Image: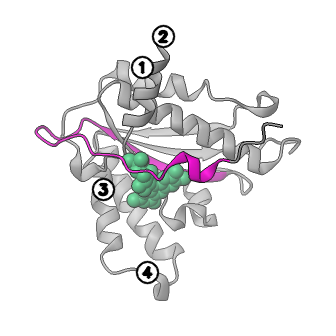
Amino acid sequence: MEPTSLDELIRTRRTIKPPMMSDAPVSDEDLQAVLENANWAPTHGMTQPWRFRVYRGDARTKLADDLAQLYLTAIPPEEQKEGKADKLRKMPTLAPVVILVWMERQKIEKIRELEEIEAVACAVQNMHLTATARDLGAFWSTPPFLYKPEMNAYLGIGEKDRCLGIFYLGHPAEGDAWPKGRRQSIEDRVEYIDA
Ligand SMILES: Cc1cc2nc3c(=O)[nH]c(=O)nc-3n(C[C@H](O)[C@H](O)[C@H](O)COP(=O)(O)O)c2cc1C
């Protein structure tokens, strides 16, 4: 591969949210590539802690209702934002594929939890880049209730496992321009120690 192709892929990857996606289905081939590439993320101790649950079709409507309900039950009323539950009730229906992502804690807890979370983040970046390479939009969403015990109970996962995101995947709406990225200079974030 040309290094510049990878540079371009990394720099053109953008968050594209469900309201900016079309109804066009994501092919099985594209979805498989996204998941397969997640599986090739680096992993300390080969724990491969990433776990995924893929929702498509009508399953998204039930998921949307459940997420709205989780928000209303897991977030104290005084912290709830107006319209957020309604938004959650809609979002999963606007993307053809919705993937819940979590970290499964190693039983012997040898590898630090932080590193297991980092490994899953690498997996999600692989998914995002694979989506971009296939002209798909993606959005890594982390509403705060994901980190609450109610979410673990909903997923049926252990209390030491950690839900880390809702990953939305779909084709960008036709006619919409691919979003422009924005970053500060890397030079403001690096120190070079040469001698
Ligand atoms: C761990 C993580 C969690 C994120 N959660 C949210 C979120 O809950 N809501 C949101 O609007 N964007 C979320 N984002 C996406 C960022 O908003 C997005 O990456 C940022 O605006 C930069 O845009 P880009 O991805 O197009 O470069 C998340 C990104 C990361 C890495």
Q: Position of residue 165 (x, y in %)?
A: 51, 51
* Image point (36%, 35%), residue name: 12
- Return the residue at label 4: 80
Q: Mark 3 against mark 1, which lies toward the viewer?
A: 1
Labels 3 & 2 near each other (Cβ < 8 A): no
Was residue 179 drawn as part of the magenta stretch in this picture? Answer: yes
Amino acid tagged 1: Ser
Q: Give the residues in magenta.
A: 162-190
Give whichever of discs 3 and 1 has the lower sequence position: 1
Labels 1 & 2 near each other (Cβ < 8 A): yes
Was residue 86 drawn as part of the magenta stretch in this picture? Answer: no
Between 18 and 75, the one lying in front of the other is 18
Amino acid tagged 3: Met
Amino acid tagged 4: Gln
Mark pair 3, 1: CA separation: 32 Å
Q: Where is residue 96 in the image (x, y as percent from the top left)?
A: 28, 39
Mark pair 4, 2: CA separation: 47 Å
Q: Mark 1 against mark 4, which lies toward the viewer?
A: 1
- Return the residue at label 3: 91
Mark pair 1, 4: CA separation: 43 Å
Mark pair 3, 2: CA separation: 36 Å
Horizontal side of residue 149 vs 114, given as left or right: left
- Return the residue at label 2: 1
Q: Position of residue 114 (x, y in %)?
A: 75, 50
